């Protein structure tokens, strides 16, 4: 492992613990408190482990990260999307945390709220799309898409889903 990849980082996000229990994960031995762990196939994997993107994706669920400042929405979205076959690899409560966590967690898809504390979802999407390995981005809000005009397309997001309409098939339709 190179010096940069061996360095522990502090990522203020919540991710699933082993067997889907508990927020946040307990500290990872050998890392400072706050380093995230990934759950893949019921096994707790630490940062530096092979990402789901490195495996054969045709045999794996699409990985997804939820970025929203409302805990109740993140919990509901997790239940809905996991039941539809998506693997939720992490959550973030604001844009800055998302930008730090996404290169580490490497989700295939980011479900990104438009209204976030600090930098908004449109700015997060634009910054992510500047990266060579940008995930697919789906914007969401409790407000109607028409409220945002051309901002969704300008951000580089693949599409928009109203929070009330969130489902696995809705995500799949946006990505198709």
Image (cartoon, helix red, strand yellow):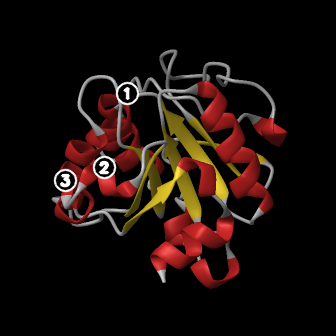
What residue do we see at 52% from left, 15% from top?
33
**Could you tell me residue 103's position as x and y percent?**
35, 49
Instruction: Kindly indicate whether the residue at mark 3 contacts the one at mark 2 (C-beta within 8 angstroms).
Output: no
Residue wearing tag 1: 9
Q: In this view, which residue lies farthest toward the top?
A: 33
Foreground mark, 1 or 3, reads: 3
Residue that badge 2 annotates: 147
Q: Is residue 172 left or right of residue 140?
A: right
Label 3, on which residue?
A: 126
How far across and how far down the image is residue 116, in percent?
35, 30
CA separation in Å, label 1 and label 3: 24 Å
Between circles 2 and 3, the one closer to the viewer is 2
Q: Earlier in the sequence, mark 2 or mark 3?
A: 3
Residue 101 visible in image = yes
Residue 2 picture location, percent across and down: 31, 46
Towards the viewer: 146 or 154: 146
């Amino acid at each position: 492992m190179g010096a940069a990849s061996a360095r522990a980082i502090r990522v203020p996000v919540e991710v699933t613990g082993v067997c889907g229990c508990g927020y946040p994960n307990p500290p990872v031995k050998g890392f400072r408190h706050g380093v995230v762990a990934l759950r893949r196939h019921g096994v707790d994997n630490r940062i530096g482990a092979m990402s789901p993107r490195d495996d054969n994706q045709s045999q794996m669920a699409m990985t997804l990260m939820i970025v929203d400042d409302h805990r109740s929405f993140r919990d509901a979205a997790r239940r809905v999307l996991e039941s539809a076959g998506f693997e939720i690899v992490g959550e973030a409560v604001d844009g800055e945390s998302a930008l730090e966590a996404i290169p580490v967690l490497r989700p295939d898809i980011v479900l990104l709220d438009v209204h976030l504390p600090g930098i908004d979802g449109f700015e997060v999407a634009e910054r992510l799309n500047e990266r060579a390995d940008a995930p697919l981005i789906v914007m969401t809000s409790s407000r109607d898409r028409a409220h945002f005009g051309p901002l969704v397309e300008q951000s580089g997001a693949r599409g928009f889903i109203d929070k009330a309409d969130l489902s696995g098939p809705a995500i799949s339709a946006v990505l198709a």
